[in-house]
Image: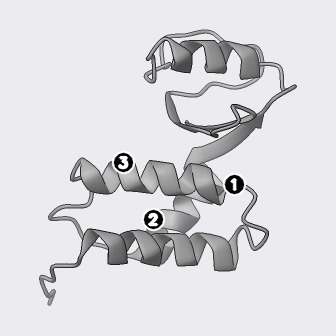
Amino acid sequence: MSVTVKIDEDVLLEMLMDRYIKWWDESGKNADLYEQMYQNYIENGAFDGMELDISVIVDNDVVNYCKVVEKGDKDFDKLLELSEQGEYDVSTEEFEEISPSFIEAVSDDKDRILVRY
């Protein structure tokens, strides 16, 4: 049996970020990247009509689907250049060390990039 619930976008974002910070990034070092990604997903209806399990969503993103690439990493410069050109689907690009499919977020200081595999 399931129940359909409506939730305010800000509350959903807060729930996702609470899980991320409490379980994966207490320092908050990369919280801005995950917040950008989840905000974008919420605004674009990615969670509309789906079964919502906050821990499954966040834990799978951190463990299985996403990676933070930092300035100085081999593929960072190429990812940054692509994002600045407005290219976020990078699934057809070739990289040296990683095989990302999508650029999810770039930090304001442009020192970190969150990618999805």
Of helix, strand and loop, which one carries label 3? helix
Q: Position of residue 23 (x, y in %)?
A: 67, 77
Q: Residue furthest front?
A: 109
Residue 6, image quadrant: bottom left
> Label 2 to label 1, Cα distance in Å?
17 Å
Dot label at residue 20: none
What is the crowding at mark 1: few (fewer than 14 residues within 10 Å), some, or many (at least 20)?
Answer: some
Image mark count: 3
Report which residue position mark 3 lands on.
Answer: 40
Q: Residue at x 70, y 25 (%)?
A: 98
What is the crowding at mark 2: few (fewer than 14 residues within 10 Å), some, or many (at least 20)?
Answer: few
Report which residue position mark 2 lands on.
Answer: 57
Q: Position of residue 44 (x, y in %)?
A: 24, 47
Q: Residue at x 12, y 82 (%)?
A: 4
Three-letter amino acid code of the residue under disc 1: Asn
Report which residue position mark 1 lands on.
Answer: 30
In the rendered structure, the answer to whether residue 48 lies left or right of residue 11 reads left
| Discs 3/2, front | 3
Q: Closer to the camera, 64 or 30? A: 30
Q: Residue at x 47, y 71 (%)?
A: 16
Instruction: Give the mark, 3 or 2, whose residue is nearer the N terminus.
Output: 3
Three-letter amino acid code of the residue under disc 3: Asn
In the rendered structure, the answer to whether residue 18 lies left or right of residue 53 reads right
